[in-house]
Structure formats: structure tokens, C-alpha cells
């Protein structure tokens, strides 16, 4: 059986690398890896961390290009790869432009698509944008669905997906954590934050760039001014617009460190050493609860409501006051903090990749 995995961003790579490693352990499976290069530098960091080499790299990213342009490049180049390899199935992950176009190309060539992390929904096409459209579109195309939770399965069933094609596996992000956390990890940034309550922040979502991000960063700046035992580490995204806002609002504060993006091993271990996490990311909402770290989601909606229901996440929006109030509560109220940090993570047990590969073998193997 020939399986081709296609992805192009750092979050996809983190979640797909455990699946690839499991695929490559199987003697009856030929696993080909194709990178689109949507996040070139950050993608390479993840691949190196998991010791995985790509068979193809489309190198599609250029400075300042639009979603339409990157989509067209992926479509053209990936069609040639599929025609060369003729895989039995293409695996894509989540909701990126790379995943959507990879699934669409496979559909045009009558190649079955497997969707890892299928069924996530906000039911708002603008939040997150364009991810909500991408994941719904992939689920129209897919032949087999690897849903991380029962709720994701219910979403698919409500859209009339054949139940025989849906498998609840857990989330491969938890598998990745088990491969990257180190008990004796330390570095200069964590030494700088030692003795404080460290807040780890990520912020990069396209719909938050502009005034929402100014408000988000303004809240963080005021929190640091109010709590002398709080320090913040912010691995800033490569997007120049994000970097400018970060410099304008957060620059010059000695208890805020704006650092370059971290590789997956470093980032997971920074999470482990943090007191709480502020994020507009998706994957962190699944990862951090496995480490007992409360997560405040700086978005107006999440496609991961299981975490909210379980109590591991709290949606705080992008308004300065709501972010400040939520952080104050966790910093000031130990019982509230303990309630979030001790909540049970609903996203799996670290064996999702094994389940996915076993199901693929049963369904598509000889």
C-alpha cells in the first residue's frame, strides 16, 4: 500500500509526524512525504526534530503572496507529484490551505483522501478564516475520517457522512507530546523566567491581525505591569504585520521576551514550564491540557468545544478587558487555577497514530 502524506505548515507537521513514523514502521506500507512549503523555515524545524525526510518539497511560498496564488501553485505542482507516484490514498491534516488543495487535487485524480483531525467546526466561515471553509470542504471530499473526539464524529454524522467511514482516534498532537517532552529540559529563557509565574503566549491568526491583536497585546502589557511576579515569553510569528504590532505594543518591557519561533521540542517544553498559556492557536488547545496547563483562548469561537466543556480551556475573546479579567482570575484565585489545571484532557491517550495506521491497513491494504 502506498500512502502519501501532504502538509505545509508547522502545526500540520507536528501532528502528522507521529503518523508518518508509525507508517514507516510497517513493512507492508510505502509512505511518501510531500511538503508544500507553506511555512518553509518553521516546517523544516519540525521535520528535523522528528528525524523525518521529505520525498518532495514544492517550495510554494514567496513574500507577501495571497491565498489564491499559493493555492494555484500547490494545485499545479502537486498534480504532477500525484501523477508520478499514484498513491493508493492521500492523508491530509486539519484545515490549512495546503490540506484543502491537496485533498482537492486527489479528488480530481480519483485518489481516496484520508482526513486526520476531521469534523472540527465553529460553523462560522469567518472564524477562523479560511480554516473553517477548508476543513468543511475536505470533509466533502474525504473517503475516510479520523475524528479526534466523539463530538467531531457527531458533527460529521450531522452532515450525512457515512458512519462506517468515521473513526474516533484521539488527536495526534498528544502523540507528539509524548515524543518531545524531556524531564531535564532547561535553557536560558526558562532560567530568565525562573521564580516567576511564566505566561506563554502565541498569537498569529489572520483574523486577529490589526486592532484585535493590539487589544490582545495591550492586555498582556497591563497584566505584566500589575503583577511583578509575572513574566511573558512570546515566540513571535514570522508574519511581518504581527511582528510590527508586537514591537509597538510589547517592546521595551523587561519582563516580556519576544523571541524567534521555537522548534517543536523547545515549544512543548516551554509549555510544560509555563503557569498558563494565552493563545489564538488551535493545536495548543489540545496539547497544553495534557500537561496540566490552563489555556485562555484569545478568539471569539473555537472548533474545540470539548476542551471548554471539560474545563481545560476558556474562551476570552480579543477585548482587552475580558482577557485581563480572565488572567486576573487565574492569577488571584488558586481554586479556579487548580480546577482548570486538573481538568481531564478530552483529546486522547497518545496512541492516535497507531489507531490511524491500523485502520488504514485494514481498509486499504491488500
Image (cartoon, grey):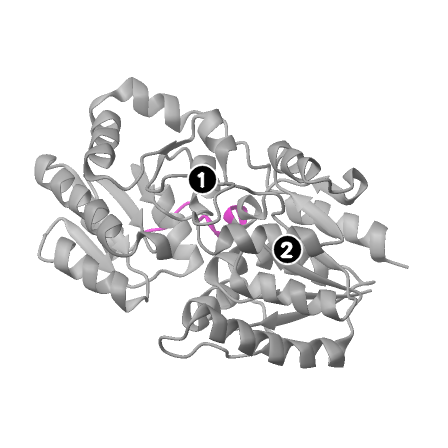
- Residue to which mark 1 is pinned: 302
Observer able to see residue 317: yes
Camera-side residue of 46 and 326 = 326
Outermost residue on the right side: it is: 366
- Residue to which mark 2 is pinned: 138
Residue 231 location (% of width, % of height)? 18, 44
Residue 246 location (% of width, % of height)? 20, 58
Q: Secondary structure at mark 1?
A: loop
The vertical placement of 236 against 350, above or below, is below
Is 180 in the magenta?
yes
Q: Which residues are magenta?
A: 177-186
Is 145 in the magenta?
no
Q: Secondary structure at mark 2?
A: helix
Q: Is residue 265 left or right of residue 361?
A: left
Residue 126 location (% of width, % of height)? 43, 50
Residue shown at 64%/32% (left/top)?
150
Q: Quadrant of the C terminus?
A: bottom right
Camera-side residue of 52 and 102 = 102
Outermost residue on the front side: it is: 125
Outermost residue on the top side: it is: 335
Dominant secondary-structure state across the stretch colored magenta: loop
What is the spatial separation of the Cα atoms under label 1 and label 2, in whole angstroms? 19 Å
Q: Quadrant of the N terminus?
A: bottom right
Amino acid at each position: 500500500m502506498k500512502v502519501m502524506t501532504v502538509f505545509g505548515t508547522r502545526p500540520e507537521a507536528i501532528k502528522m509526524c507521529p503518523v508518518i513514523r508509525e507508517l514507516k514502521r510497517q513493512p507492508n506500507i510505502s509512505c511518501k512525504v510531500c511538503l508544500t512549503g507553506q511555512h518553509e523555515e518553521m516546517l523544516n524545524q519540525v521535520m528535523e526534530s522528528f528525524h523525518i525526510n521529505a520525498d518532495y518539497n514544492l517550495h510554494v511560498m514567496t513574500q507577501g503572496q495571497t491565498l489564491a496564488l499559493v493555492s494555484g501553485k500547490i494545485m499545479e505542482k502537486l498534480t504532477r507529484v500525484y501523477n508520478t507516484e499514484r498513491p493508493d490514498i492521500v492523508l491530509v491534516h486539519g484545515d490549512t490551505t495546503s490540506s484543502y488543495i491537496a485533498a482537492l487535487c486527489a479528488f480530481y485524480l480519483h485518489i481516496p483522501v484520508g482526513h486526520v483531525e476531521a469534523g472540527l467546526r465553529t460553523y462560522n466561515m469567518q472564524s477562523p478564516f479560511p480554516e473553517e471553509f477548508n476543513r468543511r470542504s475536505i470533509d466533502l471530499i474525504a473517503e475516510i475520517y479520523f475524528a479526534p473526539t466523539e463530538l467531531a464524529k457527531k458533527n460529521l454524522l450531522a452532515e450525512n457522512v457515512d458512519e462506517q467511514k468515521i473513526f474516533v482516534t484521539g488527536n495526534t498532537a498528544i502523540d507528539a507530546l509524548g515524543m518531545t517532552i524531556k524531564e531535564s529540559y532547561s535553557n536560558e529563557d526558562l532560567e530568565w523566567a525562573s521564580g516567576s509565574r511564566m505566561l506563554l503566549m502565541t498569537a498569529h491568526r489572520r483574523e486577529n491581525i490589526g486592532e484585535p491583536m493590539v487589544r490582545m497585546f495591550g492586555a498582556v502589557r497591563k497584566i505584566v505591569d500589575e503583577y511583578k511576579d509575572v513574566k511573558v515569553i512570546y515566540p513571535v510569528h514570522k508574519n511581518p504585520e504581527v511582528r510590527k504590532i508586537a514591537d509597538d505594543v510589547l517592546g521595551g518591557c523587561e519582563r516580556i521576551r519576544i523571541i524567534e519561533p521555537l522548534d517543536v521540542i523547545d515549544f512543548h517544553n516551554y509549555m510544560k514550564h509555563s503557569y498558563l498559556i494565552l493563545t489564538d492557536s488551535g493545536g495548543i488547545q489540545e496539547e497544553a491540557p495534557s500537561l496540566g496547563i490552563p489555556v485562555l483562548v484569545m478568539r471569539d469561537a473555537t472548533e474545540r468545544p470539548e476542551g471548554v466543556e471539560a474545563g481545560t480551556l476558556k474562551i476570552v475573546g480579543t477585548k482587552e478587558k475580558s482577557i485581563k479579567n480572565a488572567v486576573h482570575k487565574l492569577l488571584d484565585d488558586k481554586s479556579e487555577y487548580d480546577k482548570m489545571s486538573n481538568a481531564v484532557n478530552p483529546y486522547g491517550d497518545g496512541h492516535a497514530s497507531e489507531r490511524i495506521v491500523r485502520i488504514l491497513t485494514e481498509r486499504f491494504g491488500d
